[in-house]
Amino acid sequence: MRATMPRHRRLHTGNTWFFTLVSFRRNPVLCLPPIRSALRRAIVDVRGTRPFDIDAWVLMPDHLHCIWTLPEGDADHAARWAMIRNAVSRVALVSTVSTGTRNPSRIEHRDASVWQRGVDAHQIRNDREFARQVDYIHFNPVRHGHAARAADWPYSTFHRYLKQGVYPADWNGSPQVEAMWIE
């Protein structure tokens, strides 16, 4: 069974995006409680002033993938990510979490070395691509060896999709999802 996009989405506006963010030097800090809490709080705060829907999400120790849909006519995902990343970095600066060595540039810019610079963004163009990327997101913990099944990973929207009946409880990818990992 594949994820499907709710019918109320209108992709022709170009407002649905797939993102990948990576931690600095792939340091496995993103699932640590202080960073995870800061990320959650930052998302809530940013959504309060600059709304967006989270269609799918997976938080891994050293990266995250997600799909957002922005309001019609608003494509400024970069500002939202900047606000989220800055808020998480501020918390990391004062927390006891070691986020890696800071070089002079990172010290000057008060960068806590939580994030690798840049956000990989890809516009979702149709329902088929949306479903494929949602499956990719939810299978990611299995692929990386963090969980035996998608349902075993706690930091994912897989559980929301499971409740909605999009996935069966024993979903663990499909031949199409597995083929996405072969280059």
Image: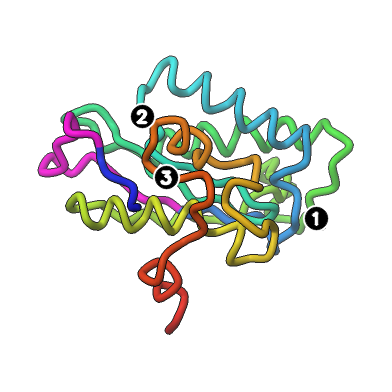
Which mark lies nearer to you, 2 or 1?
A: 2
Determine which residue is flagged by label 3.
167
Which residue type does callout 3 highlight?
Answer: Tyr
Q: Residues within 10 Å of mark 1 (few under 14, many from 20)?
A: some
Q: Which stretch did the figure color magenta?
A: 6-19
Q: Quadrant of residue 9?
A: top left
Residue 76 screen position, x and y as percent? 31, 36
Residue 80 screen position, x and y as percent? 43, 33
- The residue at the point 41 percent across, 55 percent down is 135
Determine which residue is flagged by label 1.
100
Which residue type does callout 2 highlight?
Answer: Asp
Which mark lies nearer to you, 3 or 2?
A: 3
Residue 119 screen position, x and y as percent? 46, 53
Q: Residue furthest left?
A: 12
Give yes or no for residue 28 being in the magenta stretch: no
Q: Residue furthest bottom?
A: 183
Q: Quadrant of residue 47?
A: top left
Q: Does any portion of residue 146 appear in the rendered image?
A: yes
Which label belongs to residue 60?
none
Which mark lies nearer to you, 3 or 1?
A: 3
Which residue type does callout 1 highlight?
Answer: Gly
Determine which residue is flagged by label 2.
53
Query: Position of 81 compared to 36: left or right?
Result: left
Query: Counting residues from the N terminus, which is met first, the one under dot 2 or under dot 1?
Result: 2
CA gap between label 2 and label 1 equals 31 Å
